[in-house]
Amino acid sequence: MTRRPLLLLAAVVLALAGCGDEPTRQPDSAEVARQMTLTLERGDDDYGEALAYWGRVNDALVRCMADGGQTYQPYVDQWAVDRRIALGVSREEFVERYGYGLTTLIDYLPPGVRRVDPNLATLRRMTPEQRETHQSRLTSCRREARQEFGPAPHVDTSAMTAEEGHRRDEILAAVDKDPRLVRASADRARCIEAKGFASADSRSLALSGAAERYRDGFQRAALAAEEAGRDSSALRLTDVFGVADLAELKQLQQREIAEARQVEPCQWTYDDTYQVVYREHLDRVREGRN
């Protein structure tokens, strides 16, 4: 399986909504493609535009929740924007400094976002029934916000029905079978293997797995700080881990950057081809030509 470009991947990996209360219907392919195109185009938003989007969404969520007798604290999740976009660097600069961004940005916090959802404290004080009511209202309010403001920039966590998701997957399968992408995928594999690395997407899993205890440990420390009434935004890895652990992490980071500097240029040619082919297929579906 060939890795899709990061922004495109964010644009098409949508969480399927539970729609058992709605009748099954055949989705309109053009509408599905239109939603996918909107999400793709939001991937070009800069960081200021992304924060402005979440500001509008949060204002709407506060009002909507209040209308349902619930409270909501405005919150922009730390993963709501792509790290490279937040840093304001090119893909070449990102790889040179941070590799894949797996082990190198664990304690990085983009401006204007938070490590921990401030609404969690309120939820913990609720009974199970109250939490269910609150979460149901929040899901409805988020759906309304997406309908009003469109897809989120960079990482879309909005919902499609199961039927729409199935049609989306069919469109993506057609994209993957395009002869240009088949050739680009083969070229990518040859390029990576010529540099001495495995071309399968699972190549980076070892790095990601090795960094997991650092990510989890850091997030637990951030949550503990917030629960104790402290601001976790200034928390750094050096506040959480000892010298030996940090030395091991440093080795992982150096390994990641060294590998990414060699591998990622092979990926970029594929990414650029995917961008063109993906948009062409969406255009054809929207125009009824596919």
Image (spheres, rainbow, N blue to C red):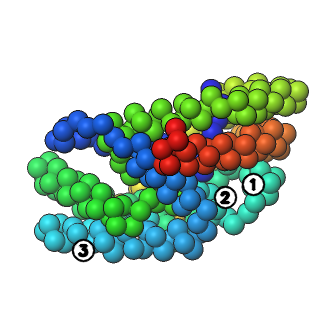
* Residue at horizontal 33 percent and vertical 75 percent from the top: 59
Residue 223 appears in the rendering? yes
Q: Is residue 160 left or right of residue 213?
A: left
Of labels 2 and 1, earlier in sequence is 2
Residue 249 appears in the rendering? no
Residue, disc 2: 84
Say what amino acid the circle numbered 2 marks: Arg
In the depicted structure, whether residue 186 falls above or below residue 145: above
Of labels 2 and 3, earlier in sequence is 3
- Residue 142 percent across, percent down from the top left: 31, 59
Q: CA distance from mark 1 to mark 3?
A: 38 Å
Q: Quadrant of residue 20?
A: top left
Q: Is disc 3 placed on a helix, strand or loop? A: helix
Say what amino acid the circle numbered 1 marks: Arg
Q: Is disc 1 placed on a helix, strand or loop? A: helix
CB within 8 Å, label 2 to label 1: yes
- Residue 48 percent across, percent down from the top left: 57, 74
In the depicted structure, whether residue 178 falls above or below residue 112: above
**Within-10-Å neighbours for mark 2: few <14, some 14–19, many 20+:** some
Residue, disc 3: 63
Residue, disc 1: 91
